[in-house]
């Protein structure tokens, strides 16, 4: 289902955006529309092209849109069932195999199938101009000419009102509370001490780690309290809405993977400045904690910013070696 983009006719910037030709699911010819594997393969091919390309390639924007549509079409076809034969809502975690299978989730665009409608701005009557006539100067609508009308709700353009289980879940979703508690209890966690200050990556970028805490030496000065630190880390893992699946699993190889295995364990790297929690793997620890060269820092920092700003995408999209 191609996404319907709502714009007010006076919002010229948005209008330019929707007037661009968009690939539709009909143009992605992969046979049966419910064949998830074929659809995902097509999306993967586009993803590889996208990865191999340069930002200023001609056709980059079209490729990006085709990839978005291909991935959405594949996601629409993702309808997994759990071991009980029931459709998976959210995610299914199997503690025996330490694997997770993503399911479906409710529409993220609406509240039970409806969204506030748009109304002509009463202050500027739709012109977007300020009281003295300045272009885009209306403060009530920010110059757009329209405002949201929460009193009059309309059908959600994204799910068409069928909001329940409307979207495929992803590894970027948060681990549900019950599963987080179980994983926090079962996950092997060990402390590694490194006699150094916190790295630039640990302080500012966060590539390859779950979280960093600055403690100005508190844990460094108490090497006999590792058990308490591990207990704190477990508590952090179990806290609701703090942890995304993607930070806990082996790199899935593609950004929209629907199944993944949990990492074998977590390392808590304690330095003179604080501690960082990361997958317990020597290459991972080395990469997460070392100082980067200037060029490397710029490239990786740019990718992290593009992927959402907190290092999550870096963990998801790059092989850990
Ligand atoms: Zn206005
Ligand atoms: Zn919706």
Image (cartoon, rainbow, N blue to C red):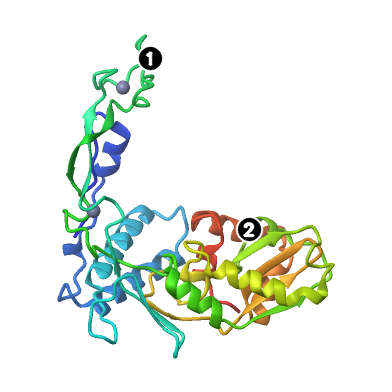
The image shows residue 105 at horizontal and vertical percentages of 30, 65
The answer as to whether callout 2 falls within 8 Å of ligand 2 is no
Mark 1 vs mark 2, CA separation in Å: 41 Å
- Residue 244, compared with residue 118, is above or below; it is below
Q: Is residue 240 left or right of residue 222?
A: left
Residue with the most extreme bottom position = 96
Q: Position of residue 116 (x, y in %)?
A: 24, 40
In the image, ligand 1 is in what quadrant? top left
In x, y percent, where is residue 43?
Answer: 32, 70
Question: Residue at 71% of width from left, 66% of height from top?
Answer: 275
| Residue at mark 1 | 134
In the rendering, which numbered label is found on residue 205? 2
Disc 1 CB within 8 Å of nearest ligand 1 atom:
no
Q: Is residue 46 above or below residue 64?
A: below
Can you give x and y, in whole percent of width and height, for residue 12 in the image?
29, 32
Identified at 44% across, 90% down, the residue is 96
- Foreground residue among 166 and 207: 166
Q: What element carries label 1?
A: loop
Question: Left or right of 265: which side holds 144?
Answer: left
The disc, 1 or 2, on the residue closer to the chain's N-terminal end is 1
> What residue lies at 36% left-to-right and 58% top-to-bottom?
64
> Does residue 158 appear left or right of residue 48 in this picture?
left
**In the rendered view of the protein, which quadrant contains the N terminus?**
bottom left
Residue 214 - label: none
């Amino acid at each position: 289902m191609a996404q319907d983009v709502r714009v007010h006719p006076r919002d010229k910037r948005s209008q330019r955006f929707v007037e661009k030709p968009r690939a539709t699911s009909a143009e992605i010819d992969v046979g049966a529309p419910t064949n998830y594997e074929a659809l995902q393969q097509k999306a993967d091919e586009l993803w590889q092209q996208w990865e191999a390309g340069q930002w200023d390639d001609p056709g980059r924007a079209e490729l990006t849109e085709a990839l978005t549509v291909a991935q959405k079409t594949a996601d629409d076809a993702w309808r997994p069932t759990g071991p009980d034969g029931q459709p998976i809502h959210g995610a299914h975690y199997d503690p025996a195999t330490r694997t997770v299978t993503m399911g479906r989730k409710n529409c993220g665009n609406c509240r039970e199938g409806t969204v506030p409608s748009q109304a002509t701005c009463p202050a500027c009557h739709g012109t977007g101009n300020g009281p003295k006539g300045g272009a885009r100067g209306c403060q009530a609508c920010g110059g757009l000419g329209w405002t949201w009308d929460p009193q009059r709700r309309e059908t959600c353009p994204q799910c068409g009102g069928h909001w329940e289980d409307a979207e495929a879940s992803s590894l970027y979703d948060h681990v549900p509370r019950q599963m987080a508690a179980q994983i926090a209890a079962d996950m092997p966690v060990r402390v590694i001490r490194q006699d150094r200050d916190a790295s630039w990556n640990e302080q500012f970028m966060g590539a390859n780690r779950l979280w960093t805490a600055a403690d100005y030496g508190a844990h460094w000065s108490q090497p006999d309290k590792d058990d308490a630190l591990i207990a704190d880390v477990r508590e952090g893992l179990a806290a609701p809405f703090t942890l995304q699946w993607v930070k806990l699993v082996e790199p899935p190889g593609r950004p929209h993977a629907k199944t993944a295995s949990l990492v074998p364990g977590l390392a808590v790297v304690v330095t003179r400045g604080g501690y960082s929690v990361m997958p317990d793997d020597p290459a991972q620890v080395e990469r997460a904690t070392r100082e980067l060269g200037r060029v490397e820092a710029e490239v990786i920092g740019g990718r992290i910013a593009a992927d959402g700003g907190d290092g999550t995408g870096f963990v998801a999209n790059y092989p850990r070696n």
